[in-house]
Image (tube, grey):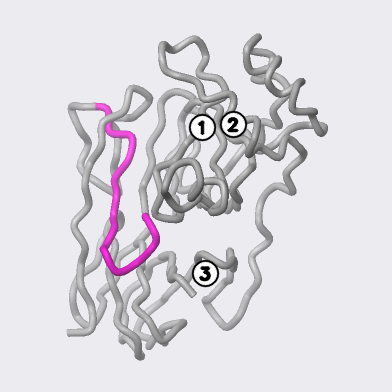
Amino acid sequence: MRTERLQGSFHEKVWGATTLSPWFPDSNGKIGEVWYHQQDIPLLLKFIFTTERLSVQVHPDDDYARVHENSAGKTEMWHILRAEPGASIALGFHETLSPDRLREASLSGEIEHLLNWVPVKPGETYFVPAGVVHAIGAGIALCEIQQYSDVTYRLYDYGRPRELHLDHAVNVARPEPHPGAVTPAVTQPGVERLVCCQYFVTDRITTTGLREVATGCEKAEYWMIMHGSLAIEGQPAAPGEVWRISPGTIPVEGDATFLRTYAP
């Protein structure tokens, strides 16, 4: 078989959710993230569920992270699966801030109001390069695709008793406006290019009936099933699952939407 269903790991978070369906069974604990990763790919794939706002944070680029954290940096993207009425994310600021202003606003809490909070809806994609100050709001389910790195610098956490990392955060932040949601580009029928950067390429694929899907590169790629019912080489694939796909042309059948991603 040229396909493999990956096993996810569930992580409880104070801001997580108990309602995870239809992607996973509902939980007694507050699950914030479900992780998928393999050693041979420099990406981490996640499903994220929120009932509270996440901290205001920023990630370093590769150069800074190597020097200060002995790690890769972190560029990521979010694809919105579900959003309660009024749900929003913060990406960048209404206007460019100086480093001193960013530090002062983080200490005072004013940063919460200077951020550009964007209402979100299912189907939207947001690209979050290293250096963009951001926060995921409450009432959201999303897919996250990111560099395999856990380096996060917190600027503000709504009074929660967690450590802030203001020196590093101010050093790496680009406190400026963000362009907003991605405009998908149709590359062939049923295939939309969402993000293409040096770390990952991600397409949204919509299938109806029986078709063959050619992989996008000569290395393995990963399919995150978002909606619908799908058979991959005759194997049932359900929402919330992530599959490793070897290079080639793969027969799929069903009505479904999934993200295809790979490291170029």
Disc number at residue 153?
1
Direction from residue 229 to residue 208 in the image, left or right: right
Q: Residue furthest front?
A: 67
Q: Amino acid at mark 2?
A: Ala
Q: Are marks 1 and 3 in contact (CB under 8 Å)?
A: no
Quick check: is 33 in the magenta stretch? yes
Instruction: Identify the residue at horizontal 34%, vertical 29% (top origin).
Output: 16
Give the Cα separation between the discs numbered 2 and 1: 5 Å
- Which residue is at 71% across, 24% downward? 102
- Front position among marks 1 and 3: 1
Q: Nearer the viewer, residue 192 or 114?
A: 114
| Residue 113: in magenta span | no
Image quarter in which the N terminus is found: bottom left
Q: Earlier in the sequence, mark 1 or mark 3?
A: 1
The magenta stretch spans which residues?
30-44
Q: Which residue is mark 3?
A: 201
Residue 173: x %, y % from top left: 66, 37
Q: Quadrant of residue 160?
A: top left
The residues bearing labels 3 and 2 have C-alpha atoms spaced at a distance of 27 Å
Query: Type of residue at label 3?
Result: Val
What is the secondary structure assignment of the residue under circle 3?
strand
Which disc, if any, is residue 250?
A: none
- Marks 1/3: CA–CA distance: 25 Å
Q: Nearer the viewer, residue 66 or 261?
A: 66
Kindly identify the residue that appears in the image at 77 percent across and 40 percent down.
177
Would you say 108 lies left or right of 251 here? Answer: right
Q: In x, y percent, where is residue 119?
A: 63, 35
Name the residue carrying label 2.
169
